Image: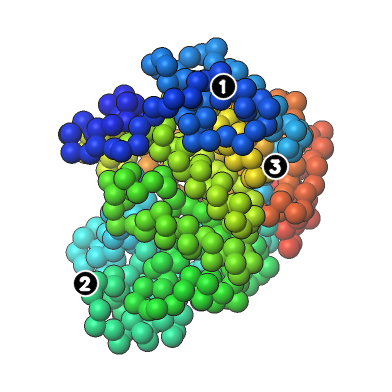
């Protein structure tokens, strides 16, 4: 995290003052003892562990190692020595978006996509036909999951009924323009869901923010929206667009996005219609440790009520090509020690979530493998295509082969396991096999994804 924000109270400009600060009346040793005993942690406990004690500045190396050791032991008790991963592909439909989040360099101004625009951009929009072709090609190669997270294109509607409502509405602002205003028609969300799931892939898509976009201008509930998406082919929901689930941070970081309560409401609705979901945190920017732990508390409460979260995914902020860096609001991301503690405290605080992911896209191979010994047990997926982190300045690659997984995971003494998105299907992989490829996808037969 940028040094200017490490204390957590005020931004460099002096315009942002936070109510929540990393200060507690708890002691680090008491919090660590509770973690060792398996007691449910409080927010103050989490802050003490994440900071290695608020009684002294900076991260204490010896205390940090104690937290990591307890978290790694907890991981072994909960899920054993397996390191899981999924054969998946990213098929993000569009980069057109007008939300204006300060952490994002994935989007392009939606106005630039209009037919009469002279503004240049490097973005894209795919039709449902193009999305189906991308998904089919991936399924034929052995992929199990198609993951799709997209910009909020103004021409997107949930379905034909939603488009009729948007066309007839005089409510402003709805962030809606008809498809004929654009060079490429993205179709409707339901058409995209049907296209990407048509060849049997597990479709992991429609974040709470996208679901909000898919109900704008109506009085439909999130249950209505997710029910229609599920009938169209949606299988599970990515709990992204979470960033930091504390509104005093969201008001600065992503003021155009839904607030914490709405995010939670959408996720609760997805669970109520039978859709498994993941949950994320994006940390290391303008938040402090108190915000991170309060975010974990929101996720734990959501899981207590729904039981539908399959995994938690800490995402270390990649800052290089983002508005936050451009405006001088950050000069770096989280340190390696902060990454280790974020993974560890996630494992200890989220006592009701089985799986914690280490993202090789965010952390790289070496650091990502280290985090598997800090409480994480999942190592993401093959991806085959990755745009969001790359556009923010990430340099750790866009795809991963099964051979890579088998070699790296076995090298740290753990067992590589191919999994389904919901973790219900698993296959242990023998790293001594000559050819290593997926077998769980609808057309997978063990052939390597990458040659």
Q: Is residue 393 left or right of residue 120?
A: right
Residue 30 numbered tag: 1
Q: Residue at x 51, y 31 (%)?
A: 46
Which of the two discs, 1 and 2, sits closer to the camera?
1
Quarter occupied by the C terminus = top right
* Of 392 and 131, the residue lying toward us: 392
Q: Is residue 198 visible?
A: yes
Residue 443 numbered tag: none
Q: Is residue 110 above or below residue 52?
A: below
Residue 162, given in percent of the width and then of the height, sits at 41, 81
Q: Quadrant of residue 169?
A: bottom left
Judging by the rendered image, the residue that carries numbered circle 3 is 84
Label 2: how many Cα within 10 Å (few below 14, some 14–19, many 20+): few
- Helix, strand or loop at disc 1? helix
CA distance for labels 3 and 1: 33 Å
CA distance for labels 3 and 2: 47 Å
Q: Residue at x 27, y 26 (%)?
A: 4
Quarter occupied by the N terminus = top left
Which of the two discs, 3 and 1, sits closer to the camera?
1
* Of 367 and 62, the residue lying toward us: 62
Q: Is residue 408 above or below residue 398?
A: above
Q: Is residue 67 visible?
A: no
Residue 354, given in percent of the width and then of the height, sits at 67, 43
Judging by the rendered image, the residue that carries numbered circle 2 is 116
- Helix, strand or loop at disc 3? strand
Residue 155, given in percent of the width and then of the height, sits at 35, 73
* Residue lying furthest front: 25
Q: Residue at x 43, y 85 (%)?
A: 161
Q: Earlier in the sequence, mark 3 or mark 2?
A: 3
* Of 369 and 401, the residue lying toward us: 369
Q: Quadrant of residue 321?
A: top left
């Amino acid at each position: 995290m940028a040094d200017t924000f490490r204390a957590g109270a005020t931004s460099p400009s002096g315009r942002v003052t936070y109510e929540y600060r990393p200060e507690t009346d708890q002691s680090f040793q008491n919090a660590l003892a509770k973690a060792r005993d398996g007691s449910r942690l409080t927010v103050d406990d989490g802050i003490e562990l994440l900071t290695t004690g608020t009684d002294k500045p900076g991260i204490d190396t010896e205390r940090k190692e104690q937290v990591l050791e307890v978290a790694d032991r907890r991981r072994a008790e909960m899920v054993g020595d397996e390191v899981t991963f999924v054969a998946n592909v990213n098929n993000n439909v569009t980069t057109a978006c007008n939300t204006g989040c300060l952490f994002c360099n994935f989007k392009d101004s939606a106005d630039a996509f209009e037919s009469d625009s002279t503004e240049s951009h490097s973005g894209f929009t795919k039709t449902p036909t193009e999305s189906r072709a991308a998904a089919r090609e991936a399924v034929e190669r052995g992929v199990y999951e198609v993951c799709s997270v997209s910009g909020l294109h103004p021409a997107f509607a949930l379905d034909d009924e939603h488009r009729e409502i948007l066309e007839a509405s005089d409510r402003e602002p709805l962030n809606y323009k008809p498809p004929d205003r654009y060079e490429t028609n993205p179709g409707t969300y339901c058409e995209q869901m049907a296209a990407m799931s048509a060849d049997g892939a597990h479709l992991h898509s429609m974040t709470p923010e996208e679901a909000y976009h898919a109900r704008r201008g109506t009085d439909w509930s999130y249950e209505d929206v997710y029910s229609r998406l599920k009938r169209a082919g949606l299988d599970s929901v990515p709990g992204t667009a979470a960033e930091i689930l504390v509104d005093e941070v969201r008001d600065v970081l992503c003021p155009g996005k839904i607030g914490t309560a709405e995010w939670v409401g959408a996720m609760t609705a997805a669970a109520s219609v039978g859709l498994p979901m993941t949950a994320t945190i994006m940390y290391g920017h303008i938040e402090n440790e108190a915000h991170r732990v309060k975010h974990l508390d929101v996720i734990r409460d959501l899981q207590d009520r729904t039981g539908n979260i399959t995994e938690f995914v800490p995402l270390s902020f990649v800052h290089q090509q983002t508005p936050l860096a451009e405006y001088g609001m950050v000069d770096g991301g989280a340190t390696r020690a902060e990454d280790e503690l974020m993974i560890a405290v996630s494992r200890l605080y989220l006592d009701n979530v089985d799986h914690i992911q280490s993202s090789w896209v965010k952390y790289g191979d070496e650091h990502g493998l280290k985090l598997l010994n800090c409480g994480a047990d999942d190592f993401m997926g093959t991806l085959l295509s990755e745009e969001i982190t790359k556009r923010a300045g990430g340099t750790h690659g866009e795809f991963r082969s099964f051979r890579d997984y088998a070699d790296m995971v076995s090298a740290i003494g753990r067992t590589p396991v191919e999994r389904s998105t919901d973790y219900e299907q698993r296959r242990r992989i023998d790293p001594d096999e000559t050819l290593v490829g997926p077998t769980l996808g609808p057309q997978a037969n063990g052939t390597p994804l990458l040659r």
